[in-house]
Amino acid sequence: MLAQLTYSKLSHLLRVCVNKPSVLGTGTEMNTGASCWLQVKRRQRSVDSKSLAERQKQQMARSLPKQKSISGVHQVLVVASGKGGVGKSTTAVNLALGLIANDPSKSVGLLDADVYGPSIPKLMNLKGNPELSDNNRMIPLINYGVPCMSMGFLVEDAAPIVWRGLMVMSAIEKLLRQVDWGSLDYLVVDMPPGTGDVQLSITQNIPIAGAVIVSTPQDVALLDARRGAEMFRKVLGLVQNMSIFQCPNCNHQTHIFGSDGARQLADTLGVQFLGDVPLHLNIRESSDRGRPVVVSSPDSPEAAAYRSLASAVVQRLQEVSG
């Protein structure tokens, strides 16, 4: 019969049990009644907490923007890192060029999402303002067969971009939605370092096929790389940049930033290790000249490392989408 009672009736009955000994007796029976009452209250609090958490989750889901694909873009790849200075932009540029080098039939675009410190104009040797199409969209600047868009095309080279969060997110929205990319198999997005407003805005607004996390082998960089990896649902894998230095005079090899740190982190996170990229003078010099190593020295071991990375990324994309 108790099973048919409502919660309020059961609560009333238990209160009577506690306050009126004559109903159930005294001593042990009194303690039993009080214990039952406390257990019921605890269960009710647990139910209320779970219900509140579920309501909050539903409200947050309703408030998030709905993801919308970028017109003409088949797959979006983001290249990210937890901190700056690990070679993320250089990796993004050579990854885009490596994808084309491996399969010239593929069309690849490059979006510089680092609003405060755009690097793509320098790395891709591009200058000037984008023109507007008939439907009032910006036309990307093209070099080495890769259409590129960057905030660096819209401001002066030395002009500081001192913007608050809302202005930055508005700029990102324009870079995502008001660019005429044409038809692309891949759009490689060079993300800013860290895990801030820009990363959040991009991951919430567009479907991302996968994320490539770049890190050096040193412990400090790996800590931030782990934070960066946790931000994305689909992590294709980790790249260990500046993995080894070979002296150009004696060919002696040195692990300046440590060895295999990113490989070990990939194992810890349960994600793929995509490969090593060496610390080499040729990569730095070619990047500074605006002639990335994949196009300036296609037969070099450094270019081969980036082409191998591009192959690993494509393979992971097939595994994730399959």
Image: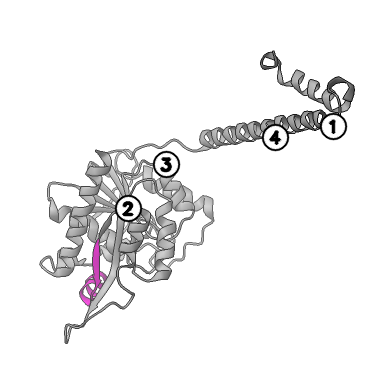
Q: Nearer the viewer, mark 3 or mark 4?
A: 4
- To which residue does mark 1 refer? 27
Disc 3, SS? helix
Name the residue located 71 percent from the left edge and 29 percent from the top edge.
40
Describe residue 192's horizontal placement relative to residue 54 as left or right.
left
- To which residue does mark 4 refer? 42
Q: Residues within 10 Å of mark 3 (few under 14, many from 20)?
A: some
Question: From mark 3 to mark 1, how far is it between C-alphas?
Answer: 64 Å
Kindly identify which numbered label has been placed on residue 205: 3
- To which residue does mark 2 refer? 271
Q: Nearer the viewer, mark 2 or mark 3?
A: 2
Determine whether label 3 and label 4 are within 8 Å by CB.
Answer: no
Q: Nearer the viewer, mark 2 or mark 4?
A: 4
Q: Nearer the viewer, mark 2 or mark 1?
A: 1
Which residue type carries mark 4?
Answer: Arg
Q: Is residue 33 above or below residue 152?
A: above
Disc 2, SS? loop
Describe residue 275's horizontal placement relative to residue 261 as left or right.
left
Residue 196: x %, y % from top left: 48, 55
Q: Please state, as top left, top right, bottom left or bottom right, where the N terminus lies in the image.
A: top right
Return the disc, 3 or 4, that comes first in the chain's sequence.
4
For the magenta stretch, what is the residue range? Answer: 275-289
Q: Residues within 10 Å of mark 4 (few under 14, many from 20)?
A: few
Q: Residues within 10 Å of mark 2 (few under 14, many from 20)?
A: some
Rendered image quadrant of residue 164: bottom right
